[in-house]
């Protein structure tokens, strides 16, 4: 029994397949793990429909730059184990390169984009077949620049976070630092000019109510209250506006000052955190293994 449990765990780790599938594969293959891997792969396409309801919340985000065009993309797998697999990472590179050379604007259009190994949909299907996991191209964005502009690509923690910055002026080092700032501090907008006025007014109304209800401010003139409110609004917006954030390298100056000192301005940025917003599956290994071998 303990040997079967170990084999099920190993097969699960190597393929990303479910515990019950691993148990069945080992049973069918007389507990030969290599044959069981082949068995699972052979059943991959037949079970393709059943993958639709499974959660692909792991994976990799990547950035590729070529001349005046760049692509940032997120491709998901079900397990972090598969996300680190060389074959999966190769597929990510193939898909992202294909997208870079395309004019696709939607996920639907992206499925038929040609790559060096066939359409994107077929590359996804092939790696899904090989691993037994659901694979998805979750999102991507193509960004183009002029000759006077510079891209700043940055990939953090092997693709857990990817950021692409586009600046005017400055140089490649400045652009990369902006991308690193975006990756680490997760701003929402470049500056207040890019922020909907309604959001600014909403924050101002919140801070105004807080100031009015603070006993410490009782009796203070409205002009003083207004200055306090504007200060608090600026501090709150510092979290969401890139240029208002504290520059990560020195922890003192604002990004706006860093950009000014390098005669640079930020045109746009894109940031992907792999799996953000997806409800991830939580595995209970002990319960899964117990369920898988209980009837043996």
Image (tube, helix red, strand yellow):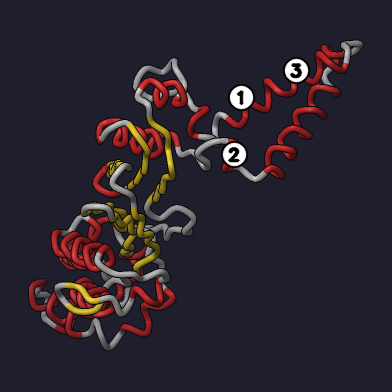
Tell us which disc is closer to us: 2 or 1.
2
Tag 2 residue: 193
Element type where label 2 sits in the image: helix
> Is 86 located above or below residue 187 in the figure?
below
Percent coordinates x, y for residue 257 in the rendering: 44, 21
Q: Nearer the viewer, mark 3 or mark 2?
A: 2
Task: Check the picture and name the quadrant holding the N terminus.
Answer: bottom left
Nearest to the eye among marks 1 and 3: give it.
3
Q: Residue furthest right?
A: 219
Q: Badge 3: few (under 14), some or many (20 or more) residues near its Cα, within 10 Å?
A: few
Q: Nearer the viewer, residue 187 or 273?
A: 187
In this rendering, the answer to whether 115 lies above or below 166 is below
Q: To which residue does mark 1 refer?
A: 235
Residue 192 lies in quadrant: top right
State the CA–CA distance, disc 3 to disc 2. 21 Å
The local secondary structure at tag 3 comes to helix
Disc 3 vs disc 2: Cβ atoms closer than 8 Å?
no
Secondary structure, mark 1, is: helix
Q: Identify the residue under disc 3.
A: 227
Residue drawn at x 41%, y 48% as measured from the top left = 270
Residue 163 at x, y percent in the picture: 35, 45
Q: What's the CA distance linking mark 2 and mark 1?
A: 16 Å
Question: Does label 1 or label 3 sit earlier along the sequence?
Answer: 3
Q: To which quarter of the image does residue 153 belong?
A: top left
């Amino acid at each position: 029994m303990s040997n079967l449990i170990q084999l099920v765990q190993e097969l699960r780790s190597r393929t990303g397949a479910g515990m019950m599938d691993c148990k069945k594969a080992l049973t069918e293959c007389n507990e030969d793990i290599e044959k069981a891997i082949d068995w699972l792969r052979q059943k991959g396409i037949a079970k393709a429909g059943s993958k639709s309801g499974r959660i692909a919340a792991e994976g990799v985000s990547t950035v590729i730059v070529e001349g005046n065009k760049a692509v940032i993309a997120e491709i998901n797998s079900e397990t972090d184990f598969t996300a680190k697999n060389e074959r999966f990472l190769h597929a990510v590179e193939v898909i992202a390169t294909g997208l870079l050379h395309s004019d696709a604007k939607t996920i639907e259009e992206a499925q038929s984009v040609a790559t060096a190994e066939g359409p994107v949909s077929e590359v996804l299907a092939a790696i899904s077949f090989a691993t037994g996991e659901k694979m998805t191209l979750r999102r991507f964005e193509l960004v183009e620049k002029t000759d006077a502009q510079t891209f700043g690509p940055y990939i953090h923690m092997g693709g857990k976070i990817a950021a692409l910055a586009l600046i005017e002026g400055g140089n490649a080092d400045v652009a990369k630092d902006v991308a690193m700032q975006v990756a680490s501090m997760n701003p929402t907008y470049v500056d207040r000019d890019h922020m909907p006025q309604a959001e600014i007014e909403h924050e101002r109304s919140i801070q105004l109510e807080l100031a009015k209800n603070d006993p410490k401010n009782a009796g203070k003139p409205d002009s003083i209250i207004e200055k306090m409110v504007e200060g608090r609004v600026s501090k709150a917006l510092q979290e969401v506006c890139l240029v208002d954030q504290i520059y990560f390298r020195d922890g003192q100056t604002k990004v706006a000052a860093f950009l000014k000192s390098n005669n640079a301005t930020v045109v746009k940025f894109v940031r992907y955190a792999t799996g953000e917003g997806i409800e991830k599956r939580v595995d209970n290994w002990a319960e899964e293994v117990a369920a898988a071998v209980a009837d043996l």
